[in-house]
Amino acid sequence: MPDLLIELFSEEIPARMQARAREDLRKLLTDGLVEAGLTYASAGAFSTPRRLTLAIEGLSANSPTTREERKGPRTDAPDAALEGFLRSTGLTRDQLEARDDKKGQVWFATITRPGRPAAEIVAEVLEAAIRNFPWPKSMRWGSGNMRWVRPLHSIMCILTDEAGAQVVPLTVEGITAGDTTRGHRFMAPDAFAVTGFDDYAAKLRRARVMLDSAEREAEIRSQAENLAFARGWQIVPDDGLLAEVAGLVEWPVPLMGVIEDRFLDLPPEVLQTSMKEHQKFFSARNPKTGRIEGFVTVANIETPDDGTTILAGNQRVLAARLSDAAFFYENDLREARAGMTHWAEGLQSVTFHNKLGSQADRIARIAALAREIAPLVGADPDHAEEAAQLAKLDLRSSMVGEFPELQGTMGRYYALAAGKPQAIADAARDHYSPLGPSDDVPTAPVSVAVALSDKIDTLTGFWAIDEKPTGSKDPFALRRAALGVIRLVLGNNLRVHSTQCFINHLMSKCLIDTNPHGTGRGDGYGFGPQPDYSIEFFVMASGGGFGGGDDQKAAFWADEAAQAATDLLAFLHDRLKVYLRDQGIRHDIIDAVLAQPGNDDLVLVVNRSVALNDMLKTEDGKNLTQGLKRAGNILTQAEEKDGVEYSFGADEKFAETEAERALFKALDTAEPAIRQATKAEDFPAAMQAIAALRAPIDAFFEAVQVNSDNQILRRNRLNLLSRIREAGRQIADFTKIEG
């Protein structure tokens, strides 16, 4: 069985596209070969800045001969039908066979497809892959029509077996496949021939090319850490930068440089970001001082002076970049020490959203909400409000204008420069967090208050103007904001009732500027703080405390806010399901808990779900669930048939069997235990108490006929089932649990 080696050699492929391109090449080729009838043992894809490589081992030499029988029209069908069938099969009439069928004689065609050699199939599949390769961006060059990410120079395509290497005959847009490639652009530019993958990889290494991107990453990491260790420094980990740099070089040569003393007082985040974004440098930290004092750059060439000239040039460019950063930072510090008033004024002219007002309007809303939330999270209300007012001012700073990824981080430095307390400064840095599933969750009370307020304002604001995520589209990152709320609440064990929080914020600070009544910003119903229309106003007005138009407007907005809050809570529940599924909790278990009262307390929901999930892993839990569902189903059918609700009146004196009496006694014991445990939110204890009902319920259904001919017994037994159902409802809606 031959091995296949393919290399597509081009100008430099952008580093960010290489990983996906490797997988696309592997999938396109292997899927195409298998579809054509070939099999293979293994396939590996590789990339460097100038080449995509695919190595397939154990490829079958030929595709098998196949036979297919296809049923056609009846023998007495019109000629047009027969001609269409012949065209579809590629046969002639004398090659068809008439066979008896249920409705008479029918034509059958036997289509034989002879096997083809692997080289022929590889050529077809590879040409199709090249012409239809899914590059995110591609280009044409010269006079040809083919598109590739960068000009494609050569194609290597060889099949190797015991007899030797064979070039697959293939020409694409004037490029004829061969068995040659080239090494490093500068250190080994000459062409050389190869006979297979092992020969190819070995000759590339001698030609100063590391084929495997993982090997290049490991080499860069190892050499950089060794260089830093020699100086007593540590490399700041950055896997994203490491993968990018490995995609920029074919022969990595790390070089270490030193940052000039005049730049060492810049915040380490500024140094790290500037070096990473502008020059792809790794930062080196001095553990004794905690400062970024050096860098590692990765060259793509070995030089006679061991990189001295390269390093000197890089340091000159770095000095220019850091001079700009130092200039921005000093200007920003002067503004911070002056109170940041110009930045605050500037945000009034920065539109957050045309229906949600300016950034200044948004800050005012967040500050008011942070003050309201602060007592719930153990924060000082004055600190929470002030932190929210300062947290986004760095958006107007020169440094954040140059490096947007430093927003929040620079806000902390500027708040400290303005003389603000540490808690307020930290909240400026932390209020965007958590940004993703792996981001740390803030725990400092002021930071939590501002971070929650920021995300709740985003959600309620866009819900108020009906800008919700649809399908895969989420332009305002509302799913991320919802997950942020969930992680903040759960990570800090916050007992916050989300619905009321949403309603309050929607009514008091996020009233829609354009609404069905035609009122506009002029009457106090626009976005931004509305001092004449507080939450107390709306509560009193909707309850009849005012007359005339105020009553109608307040009642309208109370209904609108309640509906939006309910819808937003459902969205939050959907994100919670995704979050908990990642923790190993099934969606039906979450649905069973969400059906209970208090489902806007996310901590309560999670605690219930975890306890129920643990119980359902046990044999008692699985069987108990079936008993509870069976009781509920029998009750539902009886109540629909009789038109009454069986919810009280079960009396032990009407029990005929020992199984009934045992179930009465078990319920008498379990019901108060479940109530007490759920009231104390000791859900493991509640699960233990209800699990004790498993055996009595099983025995009851085995020994007792619920729908007895004796109506007194039937009614009593149905009411007994109602007690079972209600015992389960104290914990979850067991009818929603599947299986």
Image (cartoon, rainbow, N blue to C red):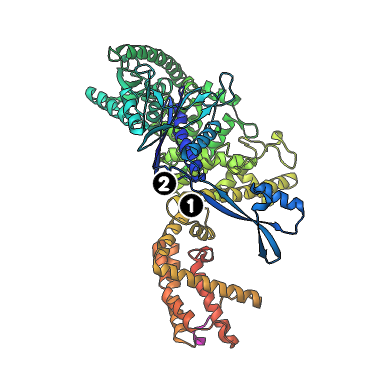
Picture layout, residue 355 above or below residue 345? below
Query: In the rendered structure, which amino acid carries the disc numbered 1?
Result: Leu
Q: Which residue is mark 2?
A: 491
Which residue is at a point 33% across and 23% down the rendered structure image? 252
Q: Quadrant of the N terminus?
A: top left
Q: Is residue 153 visible?
A: yes
Task: Tell me which label, 1 or 2, sits earlier in the chain.
Answer: 2
Picture layout, residue 568 above or below residue 129? below
Q: From the viewer's perspective, is 70 left or right of 727? A: right
Which residue is at a point 32% across and 26% down the rendered structure image? 203
Badge 1: how crowded within 10 Å, few (<14), some, or many (20+)? many
Q: Residue 226 or 171: which is nearer the viewer?
A: 171
Part of the protein shown in magenta: 650-655
Picture layout, residue 352 above or below residue 579? above
Q: Position of residue 208 (x, y in %)?
A: 33, 22
Picture layout, residue 13 above or below residue 542? above
Q: Is residue 450 visible?
A: no
Task: Identify the disc placed on residue 602.
Answer: 1
Q: Position of residue 402 (x, y in %)?
A: 48, 21
Q: Residue 101 or 241: which is nearer the viewer?
A: 101
| Quarter of the image where one finds residue 12 | top left
Q: Position of residue 60 (x, y in %)?
A: 43, 44
At numbered mark 1, what does the secondary structure look like: helix, strand or loop?
helix
Q: From the viewer's perspective, is 32 left or right of 320? A: right
| Quarter of the image where one finds residue 463 | top right
Query: In the rendered structure, which amino acid carries the disc numbered 2?
Result: Gly
Q: CA distance from mark 1 to mark 2?
A: 11 Å
At numbered mark 2, what does the secondary structure look like: helix, strand or loop?
helix
Which residue is at a point 45% across and 77% down the rendered structure image? 698
Which residue is at a point 57% across and 46% down the rendered structure image? 502
Q: Position of residue 409 (x, y in %)?
A: 43, 29
